[in-house]
Image (cartoon, grey):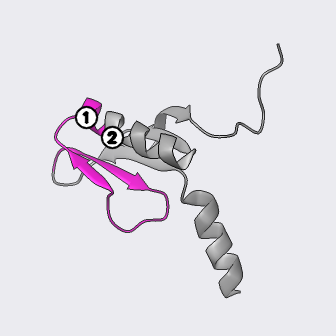
Amino acid sequence: MKKNRRLRRQASAKNYSVHPAKNGGWEVKRDGAARASFRAATKPEAIARGRVLAERAKGELRLKGRDGQIRESWSYGNDPFPPAG
């Protein structure tokens, strides 16, 4: 059971999300993390830092709104379903 938990954490540890912080500003947070990886005053600053982190991890960056819905998504890793053509 412990091994499965570790595998699940590794699979999602490549993805990051940018979302509004509770106290104002924006946070970049790795999926499954308790704390933010980066805090910024502006959304563009948070997205720029999130892109760097997601590129290094070969993962995905998701931009979330105040309601928690994903607004935009960028993939930097191995895309399992590339379009034909």
Residue at position x 16%, y 47% in the image = 24
Is residue 5 positioned above or below 49 on the image?
below
Residue at position x 57%, y 44% in the image = 58
Labelled disc at residue 20: none
Mark 2 crowd level (few <14, some 14–19, many ≥20, 10 Å Cα): some
Residue, disc 1:
45
Identify residue type, mark 2: Arg
Is residue 24 positioned above or below 9 on the image?
above
Residue at position x 29%, y 39% in the image = 46
Q: Residue at the top extreme? A: 85
Identify residue type, mark 1: Glu
Is residue 64 shown to the viewer in this render? no
Left/right of residue 81 with respect to residue 5 in the rendered view: right
Residue, disc 2:
49
Q: Which residues are magenta?
A: 24-46
Q: Are marks 1 and 2 in contact (CB under 8 Å)?
A: yes
Q: Residue at the right extreme? A: 84
